[in-house]
Image (cartoon, rainbow, N blue to C red):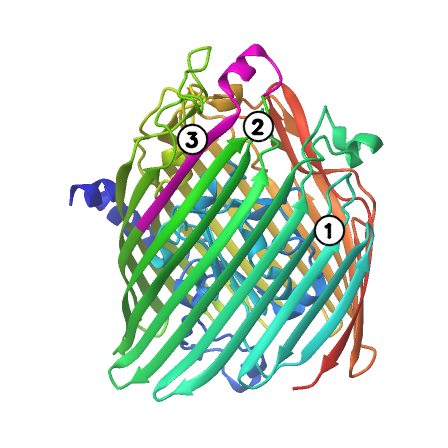
């Protein structure tokens, strides 16, 4: 009970905030974003309804839909037509359209993520975001992948859903700042396709999507040499899906497989090095590489009876990865893997004006990590002495987690709906060190300069108990228009790399779970020609986990965030549609501390890698029924690139153009012109160890594709 109290110490303060939100919304004075509420807004029915007629709130059950499960909150959806038109070669290209989200492109298929946050790059920072495939987490709790989106088939998804803000009550740990859900198959009766696309730097993509009434298979194979030296990659992704009825059960089985082999590029160094023609295409680390593979099997069993709807969702996952840590002195090699299994059980029922669901989730994991340095470290005497050749870490971790949760919606009248979600979750890590304890060399001797850098804890067990909650209200104030408010608490337990991958001076990482408090309000207006969603939020992220100047993993940081997000679309005519999404946000440190990499964090300073402004504008033109054209302008604003706020990146504006032409019933052609103005820019900018460093963005690229369709 004491652990639960520490995880949720907000009692009366939370209640008072929630009451203020309700009052604000009821008075119609609040502004907020696109929610998951299922309010019918069918523009085609306008002529058949009087303006006074109030639309009913409709709840449709789909256990694989993030938006329906989230009930209220800031959500966005990218449909199949848009995914097909964008033809993204990297997740950055599709997520730039969603307000509050920034998926920063790294080398090859690598990336870093920001959802209502700065770009998070720490060892366990990926635990702040949850990636789902058909509503099932891709990785187990405590063993996230900072490049987790390359384990998902975003390129051929039927739909992509994003929930912004803490989602712990719905999904538990690793959903601190938001959730991304990839829907692999929605309609097995849609058209099958086989396609080919080619582009610069020997780029080629072969993709297929074959569906019949009860099953579907899609695959993707991509390869390129990369525009920088020694930065080529090839990847393969396969998804399979089947659906059938078994007695009273509606059953679906899904399987996915991903493979990635890439040569990895390092940062180019020097002020605005991305604007230097030679440096832009260079690779200081041609020896770097990353090889990864993953496989997942999931099932969804749904049965509807007189007593309600029962859902069972068992899953099994396996992933492994090996790569060279070219960004560290000595360039150690890392190999990690995990095998995990779990299940979700949920019961739902309509009770008068309420819809109630209760459930449980259990998950087990066994994982391992090996870090070994094959060569002697070069550089200063200190680096050579403290980063020895040999094994740095070699450990196994087993975990077991369990959660109880509930979701409730209540409609007090035809105009309003109240929602409540609560989750109680416990996770236990069992760590076994397979190497020498402490920070010695392989032979047990100590390093000079006070000891070796890497410290290995002795065998231990750690457990974390957390509680998350959400309370929301939405109110229909006019036909096609509603306002809403939401207060939420989220958390993420420490990742295993933060607990057991220590440095000298620390034999135990006494860490707490990170926590987030969030308050949101918003408005949504949808008519036949215009759609507008505006959301405003304020968040406090406390018990922030980071590495301090002494190399210790600590959890006593704090960040305050405030933001405004908007999503506007105007169908000017049958042929023209204009869209604009944008984000205005501030993220500020709430503490003063010297941190790793020689950085100094000052209370009130802006968090680095957090643009205050981002926007995406699009014009979509239906030239004729079989041809669709889109022009896109994507803006990333200026931002600080170090914690001390002494170094900056000016931002960039990129223009893209795309065409899809269905020139016969069977054949479709596509063209994509990326970075049409050939702007020199940086996908990621950073300042560390007294040096500017960048991942240069791609120059102008032209892709041509052709696809053959097969009617179902």
**Which residue is located at x 49 percent, y 26 percent?**
605
The stretch drawn in magenta includes residue 102: no
- The residue under label 2 is 328
The stretch drawn in magenta includes residue 393: yes
Observer-nearest of 500 and 128: 500
Observer-nearest of 83 and 368: 368
Q: Quadrant of the C terminus?
A: bottom right
Q: Residue furthest bottom?
A: 247
Crowding near the residue tagged with mark 3, few <14, some 14–19, many ≥20 C-alpha atoms within 10 Å: many
Q: Nearer the viewer, mark 3 or mark 2?
A: 2
Q: Nearer the viewer, mark 1 or mark 3?
A: 3
Tell me whether the residue at label 3 lies in contact with that at label 2, contact meaning CB atoms closer than 8 angstroms.
no
- Figure quadrant of residue 405: bottom left
Observer-nearest of 555 and 327: 327
Crowding near the residue tagged with mark 1, few <14, some 14–19, many ≥20 C-alpha atoms within 10 Å: some
Q: Residue furthest front?
A: 443
Q: CA distance from mark 1 to mark 2?
A: 36 Å
The answer to whether residue 24 of the structure is visible from this angle is no
**Which residue is located at x 53 percent, y 59 percent?**
533
Residue 279 x/y as whole percent: 79, 30
**Which residue is located at x 36 percent, y 53 percent?**
365
The magenta segment is 377-399
Instruction: Check disc 2 and report its element: helix, strand or loop.
Output: loop
- The residue under label 3 is 546
Look at the picture and state if 456 lies above or below 381.
below
Of labels 1 and 2, earlier in sequence is 2
Mark linked to residue 633: 1
Instruction: Check disc 1 and report its element: helix, strand or loop.
Output: strand
Residue 704 x/y as whole percent: 82, 62
């Amino acid at each position: 009970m004491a652990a639960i109290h520490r995880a949720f110490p907000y009692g009366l303060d939370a209640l008072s905030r929630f009451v203020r939100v309700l009052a604000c919304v009821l008075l119609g004075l609040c502004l907020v974003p696109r929610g998951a509420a299922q309010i019918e807004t069918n523009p085609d029915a306008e002529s058949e309804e009087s303006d006074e007629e109030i639309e009913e709130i409709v709840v449709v059950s789909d256990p694989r839909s993030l938006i329906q499960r989230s009930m209220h909150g800031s959500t966005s959806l990218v449909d199949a037509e848009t995914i097909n038109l964008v033809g993204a070669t990297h997740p950055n290209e599709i997520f730039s359209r969603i307000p509050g989200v920034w998926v920063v492109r790294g080398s090859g298929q690598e990336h870093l993520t920001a959802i209502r946050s700065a770009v998070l790059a720490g060892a366990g920072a990926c635990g702040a975001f949850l990636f789902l495939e058909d509503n099932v987490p891709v990785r187990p709790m405590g063993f996230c992948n900072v490049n987790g989106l390359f384990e998902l088939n975003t390129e051929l998804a039927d739909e992509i859903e994003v929930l912004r803000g803490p989602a712990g009550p719905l999904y538990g740990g690793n959903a601190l700042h938001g959730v991304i859900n990839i829907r692999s198959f929605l309609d097995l009766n849609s058209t099958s396709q086989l396609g080919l696309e080619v582009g610069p730097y020997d780029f080629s993509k072969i993709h297929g999507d074959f569906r019949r009434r009860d099953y579907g298979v899609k695959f993707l194979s991509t390869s390129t040499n990369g525009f920088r030296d020694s930065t080529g990659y090839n990847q393969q992704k396969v998804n399979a899906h089947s659906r059938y009825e078994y007695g009273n059960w509606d059953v679906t089985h899904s399987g996915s497989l991903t493979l990635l082999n890439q040569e990895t590029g390092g940062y180019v160094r020097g002020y605005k090095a991305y604007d230097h023609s030679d440096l832009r295409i260079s690779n200081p680390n041609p020896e770097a590489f990353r090889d990864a593979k993953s496989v997942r099997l999931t099932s969804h069993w749904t049965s509807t009876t007189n007593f309600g709807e029962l859902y069972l969702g068992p899953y099994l996952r396996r992933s492994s990865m090996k790569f060279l840590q070219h960004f560290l002195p000595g360039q150690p090699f890392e190999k990690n893997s995990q095998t995990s299994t779990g299940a979700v059980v949920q019961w739902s029922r309509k009770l008068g004006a309420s819809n109630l669901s209760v459930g449980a989730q259990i998950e087990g994991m066994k994982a391992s990590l090996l870090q070994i340095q094959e060569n002697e470290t070069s550089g200063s005497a200190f680096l050579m002495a403290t980063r020895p050749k040999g094994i740095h870490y070699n450990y196994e971790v087993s975990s077991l987690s369990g959660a109880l949760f509930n979701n409730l919606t209540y409609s007090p009248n035809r105009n309003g709906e109240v929602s409540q979600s609560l989750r109680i979750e416990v996770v236990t890590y069992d760590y076994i060190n397979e190497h020498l304890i402490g920070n010695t060399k392989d032979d047990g001797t100590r390093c000079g300069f006070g000891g070796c850098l890497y410290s290995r804890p002795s065998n231990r067990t750690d457990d974390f108990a957390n509680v998350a909650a959400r309370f929301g209200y939405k109110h229909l104030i006019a036909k096609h228009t509603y306002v809403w408010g939401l207060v939420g608490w989220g958390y993420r337990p420490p990742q295993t790399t933060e607990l057991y991958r220590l440095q000298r001076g620390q034999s135990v990482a006494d860490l707490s779970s990170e926590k987030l408090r969030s308050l949101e309000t918003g408005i949504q207006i949808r008519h036949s020609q215009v759609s507008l969603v505006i959301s405003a939020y304020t968040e406090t992220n406390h018990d922030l986990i980071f590495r301090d100047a002494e190399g210790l993993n600590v959890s006593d940081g704090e960040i305050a965030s405030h933001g405004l997000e908007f999503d506007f679309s105007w169908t000017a005519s049958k042929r023209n549609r204009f869209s604009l999404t944008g984000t205005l946000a501030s993220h500020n440190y709430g503490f003063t501390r010297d941190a790793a990499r020689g950085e100094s964090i000052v209370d009130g300073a802006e968090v680095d890698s957090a643009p205050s402004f981002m926007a995406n504008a699009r014009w979509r033109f239906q030239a004729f029924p079989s041809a669709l054209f889109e022009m896109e302008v994507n803006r990333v604003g200026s931002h600080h690139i170090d914690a001390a706020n002494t170094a900056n990146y000016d931002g960039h504006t990129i223009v893209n153009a795309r065409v899809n032409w269905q020139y016969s019933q069977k054949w479709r052609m596509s063209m994509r012109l990326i970075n049409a103005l050939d702007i020199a820019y940086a996908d990621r900018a950073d300042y560390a160890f007294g040096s500017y460093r960048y991942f240069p963005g791609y120059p102008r690229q032209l892709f041509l594709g052709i696809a053959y369709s097969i009617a179902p």
